[in-house]
Protein backbone atom coordinates (compact mmCIF):
# COMPACT_ATOMS: atom_id res chain seq x y z
CA UNK A 1 0.00 0.00 0.00
CA UNK A 2 2.77 2.43 0.91
CA UNK A 3 4.59 1.87 -2.38
CA UNK A 4 1.57 3.32 -4.20
CA UNK A 5 1.20 6.26 -1.80
CA UNK A 6 2.35 9.75 -2.77
CA UNK A 7 4.85 11.05 -0.23
CA UNK A 8 3.13 14.43 -0.09
CA UNK A 9 -0.14 12.75 0.97
CA UNK A 10 1.36 11.38 4.20
CA UNK A 11 -0.21 13.31 7.07
CA UNK A 12 0.53 13.42 10.79
CA UNK A 13 -1.94 10.73 11.81
CA UNK A 14 -0.81 8.33 9.09
CA UNK A 15 2.83 8.80 9.97
CA UNK A 16 2.21 8.38 13.70
CA UNK A 17 0.26 5.19 13.04
CA UNK A 18 3.13 3.78 10.93
CA UNK A 19 5.70 4.67 13.59
CA UNK A 20 3.57 3.02 16.29
CA UNK A 21 3.54 -0.12 14.16
CA UNK A 22 7.35 -0.17 14.34
CA UNK A 23 8.40 1.16 10.93
CA UNK A 24 11.85 2.80 11.04
CA UNK A 25 12.54 5.99 9.06
CA UNK A 26 14.90 4.09 6.79
CA UNK A 27 12.24 1.51 5.88
CA UNK A 28 9.52 4.11 5.35
CA UNK A 29 11.81 6.18 3.13
CA UNK A 30 12.55 3.11 0.99
CA UNK A 31 8.86 2.26 0.60
CA UNK A 32 7.93 5.86 -0.25
CA UNK A 33 10.83 6.37 -2.65
CA UNK A 34 12.49 9.27 -0.81
CA UNK A 35 15.70 9.70 1.19
CA UNK A 36 15.75 8.93 4.89
CA UNK A 37 16.73 12.55 5.56
CA UNK A 38 13.67 13.81 3.64
CA UNK A 39 11.37 11.44 5.49
CA UNK A 40 12.81 12.44 8.86
CA UNK A 41 12.43 16.18 8.12
CA UNK A 42 8.79 15.61 7.15
CA UNK A 43 8.19 13.66 10.37
CA UNK A 44 9.77 16.37 12.49
CA UNK A 45 7.84 19.14 10.66
CA UNK A 46 4.63 17.27 11.48
CA UNK A 47 5.69 16.98 15.12
CA UNK A 48 5.79 13.18 15.11
CA UNK A 49 8.45 12.30 17.66
CA UNK A 50 8.81 9.48 20.18
CA UNK A 51 8.29 9.92 23.89
CA UNK A 52 10.24 8.02 26.53
CA UNK A 53 8.84 5.84 29.28
CA UNK A 54 10.62 4.65 32.40
CA UNK A 55 11.02 0.95 33.06
CA UNK A 56 8.91 0.31 36.15
CA UNK A 57 11.48 -1.25 38.48
CA UNK A 58 9.19 -0.90 41.54
CA UNK A 59 6.27 -3.07 40.35
CA UNK A 60 3.96 -0.02 40.54
CA UNK A 61 4.29 0.14 44.34
CA UNK A 62 6.38 3.32 44.39
CA UNK A 63 7.27 6.14 42.03
CA UNK A 64 10.16 5.12 39.77
CA UNK A 65 13.35 7.07 40.47
CA UNK A 66 15.74 5.29 38.09
CA UNK A 67 16.01 6.91 34.67
CA UNK A 68 15.91 3.63 32.73
CA UNK A 69 14.16 4.69 29.52
CA UNK A 70 12.74 3.27 26.31
CA UNK A 71 11.01 5.01 23.40
CA UNK A 72 7.43 4.68 22.21
CA UNK A 73 5.03 6.69 20.06
CA UNK A 74 2.55 7.44 22.86
CA UNK A 75 1.50 10.81 24.28
CA UNK A 76 3.11 11.38 27.70
CA UNK A 77 6.91 11.59 28.08
CA UNK A 78 8.44 10.48 31.38
CA UNK A 79 12.08 11.36 30.56
CA UNK A 80 12.19 14.64 32.52
CA UNK A 81 15.60 15.76 31.17
CA UNK A 82 17.65 18.09 33.36
CA UNK A 83 19.57 21.25 32.45
CA UNK A 84 22.89 19.82 33.73
CA UNK A 85 26.02 19.53 31.57
CA UNK A 86 25.79 16.07 30.09
CA UNK A 87 28.05 13.61 28.32
CA UNK A 88 26.41 10.89 26.25
CA UNK A 89 28.25 7.59 25.63
CA UNK A 90 27.17 5.38 22.72
CA UNK A 91 27.56 1.71 23.63
CA UNK A 92 28.39 -1.26 21.44
CA UNK A 93 24.97 -2.77 20.84
CA UNK A 94 24.60 -6.55 20.49
CA UNK A 95 27.65 -8.65 21.31
CA UNK A 96 29.14 -10.95 18.70
CA UNK A 97 32.59 -12.25 17.92
CA UNK A 98 34.73 -9.17 17.28
CA UNK A 99 32.26 -6.77 18.94
CA UNK A 100 32.64 -7.92 22.50
CA UNK A 101 32.63 -7.02 26.13
CA UNK A 102 36.00 -5.22 25.93
CA UNK A 103 34.23 -2.26 24.32
CA UNK A 104 31.57 -2.30 27.01
CA UNK A 105 34.39 -2.06 29.58
CA UNK A 106 35.58 1.13 27.88
CA UNK A 107 32.06 2.62 27.82
CA UNK A 108 31.56 1.92 31.53
CA UNK A 109 34.91 3.47 32.49
CA UNK A 110 34.21 6.52 30.31
CA UNK A 111 30.87 7.01 32.07
CA UNK A 112 32.51 6.67 35.48
CA UNK A 113 35.23 9.19 34.59
CA UNK A 114 32.72 11.76 33.31
CA UNK A 115 30.62 11.38 36.44
CA UNK A 116 33.76 11.92 38.56
CA UNK A 117 34.36 15.15 36.62
CA UNK A 118 30.90 16.48 37.46
CA UNK A 119 29.02 15.67 34.26
CA UNK A 120 25.64 14.01 34.16
CA UNK A 121 26.20 10.78 32.23
CA UNK A 122 23.88 9.25 29.65
CA UNK A 123 24.38 5.74 28.25
CA UNK A 124 22.74 4.62 25.02
CA UNK A 125 22.80 0.86 24.51
CA UNK A 126 20.37 -1.96 23.78
CA UNK A 127 22.13 -5.01 25.19
CA UNK A 128 20.86 -6.22 28.59
CA UNK A 129 23.85 -8.59 28.92
CA UNK A 130 26.29 -5.73 29.50
CA UNK A 131 27.51 -3.78 32.50
CA UNK A 132 26.86 -0.50 30.69
CA UNK A 133 23.11 -1.18 30.90
CA UNK A 134 23.18 -1.71 34.68
CA UNK A 135 20.91 0.86 36.33
CA UNK A 136 23.71 2.43 38.38
CA UNK A 137 26.44 2.70 35.70
CA UNK A 138 25.17 6.04 34.37
CA UNK A 139 22.80 8.74 35.58
CA UNK A 140 20.45 8.00 32.72
CA UNK A 141 20.15 4.95 30.46
CA UNK A 142 18.36 4.87 27.13
CA UNK A 143 17.67 1.29 26.17
CA UNK A 144 17.61 2.00 22.42
CA UNK A 145 19.16 0.59 19.20
CA UNK A 146 22.37 2.22 17.97
CA UNK A 147 20.86 3.74 14.82
CA UNK A 148 21.03 7.28 13.46
CA UNK A 149 17.28 7.77 13.96
CA UNK A 150 17.26 6.68 17.61
CA UNK A 151 20.41 8.57 18.61
CA UNK A 152 19.22 11.82 16.98
CA UNK A 153 15.94 11.64 18.91
CA UNK A 154 17.77 11.20 22.24
CA UNK A 155 20.18 14.05 21.43
CA UNK A 156 17.21 16.30 20.56
CA UNK A 157 15.64 15.56 23.94
CA UNK A 158 18.73 15.63 26.20
CA UNK A 159 20.87 18.25 24.42
CA UNK A 160 24.21 16.89 25.70
CA UNK A 161 27.43 18.90 25.92
CA UNK A 162 29.23 16.12 24.08
CA UNK A 163 28.74 12.62 22.62
CA UNK A 164 31.43 9.90 22.78
CA UNK A 165 31.46 7.47 19.84
CA UNK A 166 35.00 6.09 20.21
CA UNK A 167 34.42 3.48 22.89
CA UNK A 168 31.64 1.23 21.57
CA UNK A 169 33.53 -0.36 18.69
CA UNK A 170 32.56 -0.17 15.02
CA UNK A 171 28.79 0.08 15.65
CA UNK A 172 28.67 3.69 16.94
CA UNK A 173 31.76 4.65 14.93
CA UNK A 174 29.84 4.11 11.69
CA UNK A 175 27.34 6.75 12.84
CA UNK A 176 29.97 9.42 13.51
CA UNK A 177 29.91 11.27 10.16
CA UNK A 178 26.10 11.37 9.89
CA UNK A 179 25.74 12.43 13.52
CA UNK A 180 28.19 15.29 12.96
CA UNK A 181 26.36 16.29 9.77
CA UNK A 182 23.17 16.54 11.85
CA UNK A 183 24.81 18.89 14.35
CA UNK A 184 25.52 16.37 17.11
CA UNK A 185 28.46 17.61 19.29
CA UNK A 186 30.91 14.70 18.99
CA UNK A 187 33.85 15.14 21.37
CA UNK A 188 37.31 13.66 21.03
CA UNK A 189 38.75 12.56 17.70
CA UNK A 190 36.79 14.11 14.83
CA UNK A 191 34.83 11.91 12.38
CA UNK A 192 37.12 13.20 9.61
CA UNK A 193 40.21 11.96 11.49
CA UNK A 194 38.50 8.58 11.99
CA UNK A 195 37.82 8.45 8.25
CA UNK A 196 41.45 9.33 7.45
CA UNK A 197 42.52 6.21 9.32
CA UNK A 198 39.76 3.97 7.88
CA UNK A 199 40.01 5.20 4.27
CA UNK A 200 42.97 3.34 2.78
CA UNK A 201 43.77 6.04 0.21
CA UNK A 202 43.87 8.86 2.77
CA UNK A 203 45.73 6.65 5.24
CA UNK A 204 48.41 5.83 2.68
CA UNK A 205 48.97 9.53 1.98
CA UNK A 206 49.52 10.16 5.69
CA UNK A 207 51.91 7.23 6.11
CA UNK A 208 53.97 8.32 3.10
CA UNK A 209 54.13 11.89 4.40
CA UNK A 210 55.46 10.64 7.77
CA UNK A 211 58.01 8.33 6.14
CA UNK A 212 56.55 5.20 7.75
CA UNK A 213 56.72 1.84 5.96
CA UNK A 214 53.56 0.02 4.92
CA UNK A 215 53.14 -3.33 3.11
CA UNK A 216 52.35 -2.84 -0.62
CA UNK A 217 48.58 -2.52 -0.89
CA UNK A 218 45.62 -1.36 -2.93
CA UNK A 219 41.82 -1.04 -3.04
CA UNK A 220 39.40 -2.68 -5.44
CA UNK A 221 35.65 -2.83 -6.04
CA UNK A 222 35.73 -5.51 -8.79
CA UNK A 223 37.69 -8.67 -9.52
CA UNK A 224 39.45 -7.02 -12.50
CA UNK A 225 40.70 -4.21 -10.26
CA UNK A 226 41.78 -6.73 -7.59
CA UNK A 227 43.54 -8.92 -10.16
CA UNK A 228 45.56 -5.94 -11.45
CA UNK A 229 46.64 -5.03 -7.89
CA UNK A 230 47.58 -8.67 -7.19
CA UNK A 231 49.71 -8.73 -10.33
CA UNK A 232 51.52 -5.58 -9.19
CA UNK A 233 52.25 -6.55 -5.57
CA UNK A 234 52.24 -10.37 -5.72
CA UNK A 235 50.79 -13.19 -3.64
CA UNK A 236 50.09 -14.06 -0.88
CA UNK A 237 47.62 -11.26 -0.14
CA UNK A 238 45.54 -10.50 2.89
CA UNK A 239 42.14 -9.26 1.70
CA UNK A 240 39.40 -7.69 3.79
CA UNK A 241 36.43 -5.34 3.53
CA UNK A 242 36.80 -1.79 4.82
CA UNK A 243 34.86 -0.56 7.87
CA UNK A 244 34.43 -3.93 9.60
CA UNK A 245 35.41 -5.20 13.04
CA UNK A 246 36.72 -8.52 14.25
CA UNK A 247 38.37 -9.38 10.92
CA UNK A 248 34.98 -10.26 9.43
CA UNK A 249 35.36 -11.74 5.93
CA UNK A 250 39.15 -11.31 6.10
CA UNK A 251 41.24 -14.00 4.39
CA UNK A 252 44.73 -14.78 3.11
CA UNK A 253 44.67 -15.69 -0.59
CA UNK A 254 47.50 -17.37 -2.48
CA UNK A 255 46.35 -17.42 -6.13
CA UNK A 256 44.12 -15.82 -8.76
CA UNK A 257 41.53 -18.59 -8.30
CA UNK A 258 41.31 -17.96 -4.54
CA UNK A 259 41.01 -14.22 -5.15
CA UNK A 260 38.22 -14.72 -7.70
CA UNK A 261 36.40 -17.01 -5.28
CA UNK A 262 36.73 -14.47 -2.47
CA UNK A 263 35.43 -11.60 -4.60
CA UNK A 264 32.43 -13.66 -5.71
CA UNK A 265 31.52 -14.55 -2.09
CA UNK A 266 32.00 -11.20 -0.38
CA UNK A 267 28.80 -9.31 0.36
CA UNK A 268 30.64 -6.29 1.78
CA UNK A 269 32.12 -4.82 -1.42
CA UNK A 270 30.71 -1.52 -2.72
CA UNK A 271 32.15 1.56 -4.39
CA UNK A 272 31.92 3.36 -1.04
CA UNK A 273 33.47 0.44 0.85
CA UNK A 274 35.99 -1.27 -1.45
CA UNK A 275 37.99 -4.38 -0.65
CA UNK A 276 41.48 -3.83 0.81
CA UNK A 277 44.40 -5.89 -0.46
CA UNK A 278 47.73 -5.98 1.40
CA UNK A 279 50.88 -7.94 0.69
CA UNK A 280 50.98 -10.63 3.37
CA UNK A 281 54.24 -10.51 5.33
CA UNK A 282 55.55 -14.03 5.95
CA UNK A 283 57.49 -14.79 9.15
CA UNK A 284 56.74 -11.37 10.61
CA UNK A 285 56.15 -10.51 14.28
CA UNK A 286 52.94 -8.60 14.89
CA UNK A 287 52.76 -5.88 17.55
CA UNK A 288 49.83 -3.97 19.06
CA UNK A 289 50.34 -0.52 20.58
CA UNK A 290 47.69 1.29 22.62
CA UNK A 291 48.09 5.01 23.29
CA UNK A 292 46.18 8.13 24.35
CA UNK A 293 46.54 11.60 22.86
CA UNK A 294 45.13 14.92 24.06
CA UNK A 295 45.93 16.55 20.73
CA UNK A 296 49.39 17.64 21.88
CA UNK A 297 50.96 15.02 24.14
CA UNK A 298 50.82 11.26 23.59
CA UNK A 299 50.88 8.66 26.37
CA UNK A 300 51.97 5.17 25.32
CA UNK A 301 49.76 2.74 27.23
CA UNK A 302 51.52 -0.46 26.27
CA UNK A 303 53.44 -2.33 23.57
CA UNK A 304 52.18 -5.90 23.13
CA UNK A 305 54.14 -8.49 21.18
CA UNK A 306 52.02 -11.19 19.57
CA UNK A 307 53.14 -14.76 20.10
CA UNK A 308 51.61 -16.07 16.86
CA UNK A 309 53.04 -14.77 13.60
CA UNK A 310 51.34 -11.98 11.64
CA UNK A 311 48.22 -13.27 9.90
CA UNK A 312 46.34 -14.44 13.00
CA UNK A 313 43.72 -11.89 14.07
CA UNK A 314 44.86 -9.75 17.00
CA UNK A 315 41.76 -10.80 18.95
CA UNK A 316 42.82 -14.47 18.66
CA UNK A 317 46.58 -14.12 19.02
CA UNK A 318 48.21 -14.44 22.43
CA UNK A 319 50.33 -11.43 23.32
CA UNK A 320 52.86 -10.38 25.93
CA UNK A 321 53.19 -7.08 27.80
CA UNK A 322 56.00 -6.05 27.94
CA UNK A 323 57.40 -7.59 24.71
CA UNK A 324 59.45 -10.74 25.27
CA UNK A 325 61.81 -10.53 22.29
CA UNK A 326 61.73 -7.02 20.79
CA UNK A 327 64.87 -4.94 21.20
CA UNK A 328 64.75 -1.61 23.01
CA UNK A 329 65.61 0.14 19.74
CA UNK A 330 62.59 -1.42 17.96
CA UNK A 331 60.31 -0.49 20.88
CA UNK A 332 61.53 3.13 20.79
CA UNK A 333 60.87 3.27 17.03
CA UNK A 334 57.33 1.99 17.66
CA UNK A 335 56.76 4.69 20.28
CA UNK A 336 58.05 7.37 17.91
CA UNK A 337 55.86 6.22 15.00
CA UNK A 338 52.82 6.00 17.27
CA UNK A 339 53.30 9.59 18.48
CA UNK A 340 53.75 10.86 14.90
CA UNK A 341 50.55 9.20 13.67
CA UNK A 342 48.46 10.29 16.67
CA UNK A 343 49.49 13.93 16.20
CA UNK A 344 49.09 13.83 12.42
CA UNK A 345 45.56 12.42 12.72
CA UNK A 346 44.65 14.91 15.43
CA UNK A 347 43.58 12.15 17.81
CA UNK A 348 41.97 13.21 21.07
CA UNK A 349 41.34 10.05 23.06
CA UNK A 350 42.37 6.45 22.45
CA UNK A 351 44.33 5.18 19.47
CA UNK A 352 45.47 1.65 18.61
CA UNK A 353 47.93 0.64 15.91
CA UNK A 354 49.05 -2.73 14.62
CA UNK A 355 52.55 -3.19 13.27
CA UNK A 356 54.47 -6.06 11.66
CA UNK A 357 58.22 -6.41 12.14
CA UNK A 358 60.12 -8.29 9.45
CA UNK A 359 63.93 -8.31 9.22
CA UNK A 360 64.10 -5.45 11.76
CA UNK A 361 61.89 -3.26 9.57
CA UNK A 362 58.64 -1.89 11.02
CA UNK A 363 55.54 -1.87 8.82
CA UNK A 364 52.29 -0.27 9.97
CA UNK A 365 49.30 -2.51 9.18
CA UNK A 366 46.43 -0.35 10.42
CA UNK A 367 45.60 2.47 12.80
CA UNK A 368 42.32 2.74 14.71
CA UNK A 369 41.60 6.08 16.44
CA UNK A 370 39.18 4.42 18.85
CA UNK A 371 39.09 1.97 21.76
CA UNK A 372 40.65 -1.41 21.02
CA UNK A 373 39.86 -4.77 22.58
CA UNK A 374 43.29 -4.73 24.24
CA UNK A 375 42.43 -1.70 26.43
CA UNK A 376 41.13 -3.72 29.43
CA UNK A 377 44.20 -5.99 29.34
CA UNK A 378 46.68 -3.11 29.21
CA UNK A 379 44.78 -1.20 31.91
CA UNK A 380 44.91 -4.16 34.29
CA UNK A 381 48.63 -4.68 33.70
CA UNK A 382 49.68 -1.06 34.23
CA UNK A 383 47.14 -0.34 36.98
CA UNK A 384 45.68 2.71 35.20
CA UNK A 385 42.38 2.90 33.33
CA UNK A 386 43.23 4.01 29.81
CA UNK A 387 39.53 4.51 29.06
CA UNK A 388 39.12 6.95 31.97
CA UNK A 389 42.25 8.92 31.03
CA UNK A 390 41.09 9.07 27.39
CA UNK A 391 37.57 10.17 28.33
CA UNK A 392 38.97 13.05 30.39
CA UNK A 393 41.11 14.09 27.40
CA UNK A 394 37.97 14.11 25.25
CA UNK A 395 36.27 16.36 27.80
CA UNK A 396 39.14 18.86 27.53
CA UNK A 397 41.38 17.79 30.44
CA UNK A 398 44.94 17.41 29.11
CA UNK A 399 47.34 14.59 29.97
CA UNK A 400 49.53 17.14 31.75
CA UNK A 401 46.59 18.27 33.89
CA UNK A 402 45.88 14.62 34.70
CA UNK A 403 49.60 14.04 35.47
CA UNK A 404 49.59 11.15 32.98
CA UNK A 405 52.57 11.93 30.74
CA UNK A 406 54.91 9.05 31.65
CA UNK A 407 54.58 5.52 30.30
CA UNK A 408 54.25 2.89 33.01
CA UNK A 409 56.77 0.04 32.79
CA UNK A 410 55.51 -3.17 34.44
CA UNK A 411 58.04 -5.09 36.54
CA UNK A 412 56.47 -8.41 35.55
CA UNK A 413 55.23 -10.16 32.43
CA UNK A 414 51.56 -10.49 31.55
CA UNK A 415 50.30 -12.75 28.77
CA UNK A 416 46.82 -12.44 27.27
CA UNK A 417 45.55 -15.69 25.79
CA UNK A 418 42.32 -16.32 23.94
CA UNK A 419 39.61 -18.87 24.69
CA UNK A 420 37.97 -20.62 21.75
CA UNK A 421 34.53 -22.28 21.41
CA UNK A 422 35.72 -25.31 19.44
CA UNK A 423 34.47 -27.85 22.00
CA UNK A 424 30.93 -26.43 21.72
CA UNK A 425 31.14 -26.19 17.91
CA UNK A 426 32.97 -29.34 16.80
CA UNK A 427 32.44 -28.64 13.10
CA UNK A 428 34.33 -25.33 13.15
CA UNK A 429 37.78 -25.27 11.52
CA UNK A 430 40.27 -24.82 14.41
CA UNK A 431 42.99 -23.34 12.19
CA UNK A 432 43.39 -19.68 13.14
CA UNK A 433 43.54 -16.94 10.53
CA UNK A 434 42.72 -13.26 10.01
CA UNK A 435 39.02 -13.63 10.91
CA UNK A 436 38.42 -13.52 14.67
CA UNK A 437 37.01 -16.66 16.36
CA UNK A 438 37.73 -16.38 20.07
CA UNK A 439 34.92 -15.84 22.56
CA UNK A 440 36.94 -14.82 25.61
CA UNK A 441 40.41 -14.29 27.02
CA UNK A 442 42.48 -14.92 30.14
CA UNK A 443 45.61 -13.32 31.61
CA UNK A 444 48.65 -15.00 33.13
CA UNK A 445 51.13 -13.02 35.25
CA UNK A 446 54.68 -14.05 36.19
CA UNK A 447 58.19 -12.84 36.87
CA UNK A 448 59.29 -14.30 33.52
CA UNK A 449 57.60 -14.58 30.15
CA UNK A 450 57.65 -18.39 30.39
CA UNK A 451 55.89 -18.37 33.77
CA UNK A 452 53.23 -15.91 32.57
CA UNK A 453 52.61 -17.93 29.40
CA UNK A 454 52.32 -21.21 31.32
CA UNK A 455 49.75 -19.66 33.69
CA UNK A 456 47.73 -18.31 30.76
CA UNK A 457 47.72 -21.80 29.19
CA UNK A 458 46.41 -23.29 32.43
CA UNK A 459 43.76 -20.58 32.72
CA UNK A 460 42.26 -21.38 29.30
CA UNK A 461 41.48 -24.90 30.57
CA UNK A 462 42.68 -26.27 27.27
CA UNK A 463 43.98 -29.87 27.19
CA UNK A 464 47.44 -29.73 28.73
CA UNK A 465 50.51 -31.13 26.98
CA UNK A 466 52.08 -34.11 28.73
CA UNK A 467 55.70 -33.70 29.90
CA UNK A 468 56.83 -36.56 27.62
CA UNK A 469 55.48 -39.06 25.12
CA UNK A 470 54.79 -39.02 21.38
CA UNK A 471 54.57 -35.73 19.43
CA UNK A 472 52.83 -35.65 16.02
CA UNK A 473 54.16 -32.98 13.64
CA UNK A 474 52.63 -32.04 10.28
CA UNK A 475 53.35 -28.66 8.65
CA UNK A 476 53.06 -27.11 5.20
CA UNK A 477 56.16 -26.74 3.00
CA UNK A 478 56.60 -23.05 3.86
CA UNK A 479 56.90 -23.90 7.56
CA UNK A 480 59.26 -26.89 7.27
CA UNK A 481 62.50 -24.89 7.77
CA UNK A 482 61.13 -23.38 10.98
CA UNK A 483 59.95 -26.70 12.47
CA UNK A 484 63.46 -28.14 12.80
CA UNK A 485 64.39 -26.19 15.96
CA UNK A 486 61.02 -26.97 17.56
CA UNK A 487 61.39 -30.67 16.80
CA UNK A 488 64.89 -30.65 18.33
CA UNK A 489 63.54 -29.07 21.52
CA UNK A 490 60.83 -31.73 21.73
CA UNK A 491 63.50 -34.42 21.44
CA UNK A 492 65.55 -32.71 24.16
CA UNK A 493 62.47 -32.82 26.42
CA UNK A 494 62.20 -36.59 25.94
CA UNK A 495 59.49 -36.78 23.27
CA UNK A 496 59.52 -39.25 20.39
CA UNK A 497 58.56 -37.76 17.02
CA UNK A 498 55.86 -38.90 14.60
CA UNK A 499 55.37 -36.98 11.32
CA UNK A 500 53.48 -37.03 8.03
CA UNK A 501 55.48 -37.90 4.91
CA UNK A 502 56.71 -34.46 3.83
CA UNK A 503 57.46 -33.30 7.36
CA UNK A 504 59.17 -36.61 8.18
CA UNK A 505 61.45 -36.24 5.15
CA UNK A 506 62.39 -32.70 6.26
CA UNK A 507 63.16 -33.85 9.81
CA UNK A 508 65.22 -36.84 8.62
CA UNK A 509 67.13 -34.58 6.23
CA UNK A 510 68.06 -32.46 9.26
CA UNK A 511 69.31 -35.55 11.08
CA UNK A 512 66.41 -35.83 13.53
CA UNK A 513 64.96 -39.27 14.30
CA UNK A 514 61.23 -39.64 13.62
CA UNK A 515 58.66 -42.21 12.54
CA UNK A 516 56.44 -41.58 9.54
CA UNK A 517 52.65 -41.89 9.77
Image (cartoon, rainbow, N blue to C red):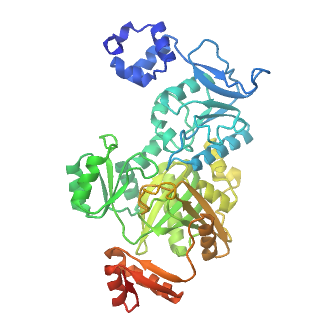
Measured from the top left, where is residue 194 in percent x and y?
46, 45
The total number of labels drawn is: 0
Taking the spot 41% from the left edge, 9% from the top edge, the residue there is: 10
Taking the spot 39% from the left edge, 51% from the top edge, the residue there is: 203
Q: In which quarter of the image is the C terminus?
A: bottom left
> Vertical placement of 285 versus 466: above or below?
above
- Relative horizontal placement of residue 327, taking residue 88 as reference (left or right): left
Measured from the top left, where is residue 163 in percent x and y?
58, 35
> Vertical placement of 365 versus 457: above or below?
above
Measured from the top left, where is residue 485 in percent x and y?
44, 84
Q: Nearer the viewer, residue 508 or 203?
A: 508
Q: In which quarter of the image is the N terminus?
A: top left
Taking the spot 31% from the left edge, 46% from the top edge, the residue there is: 266
Location of residue 403 by image quarter: bottom right
> Vertical placement of 477 versus 298: above or below?
below
Q: Nearer the viewer, residue 162 or 304?
A: 304
Q: Which of 503 and 80 is in front in this view?
A: 503
Do we see residue 414 in this rendering? no
Q: Which residue lies furthest to the bottom in this view?
A: 511
Do we see residue 407 in this rendering? yes
Measured from the top left, where is residue 454 in percent x and y?
61, 73
Q: Nearer the viewer, residue 344 or 369?
A: 369
Q: Which residue lies furthest to the right in this view?
A: 62
> Vertical placement of 119 versus 253: above or below?
above
Amino acid sequence: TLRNTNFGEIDKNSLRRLKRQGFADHRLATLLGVSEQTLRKRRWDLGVRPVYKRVDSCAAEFAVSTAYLYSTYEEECEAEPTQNRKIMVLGGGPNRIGQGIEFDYCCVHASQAMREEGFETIMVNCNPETVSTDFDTSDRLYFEPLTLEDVLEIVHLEKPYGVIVQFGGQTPLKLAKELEANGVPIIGTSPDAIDRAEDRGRFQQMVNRLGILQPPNGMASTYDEAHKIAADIGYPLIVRPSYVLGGRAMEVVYSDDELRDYMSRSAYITKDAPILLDRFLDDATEVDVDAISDGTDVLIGGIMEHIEQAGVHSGDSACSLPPFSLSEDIQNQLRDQMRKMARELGVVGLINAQFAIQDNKIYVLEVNPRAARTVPFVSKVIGRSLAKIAARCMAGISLAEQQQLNEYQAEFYAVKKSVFPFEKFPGVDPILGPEMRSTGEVMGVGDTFAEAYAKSELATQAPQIAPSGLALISVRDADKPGIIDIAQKLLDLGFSLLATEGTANALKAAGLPCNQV
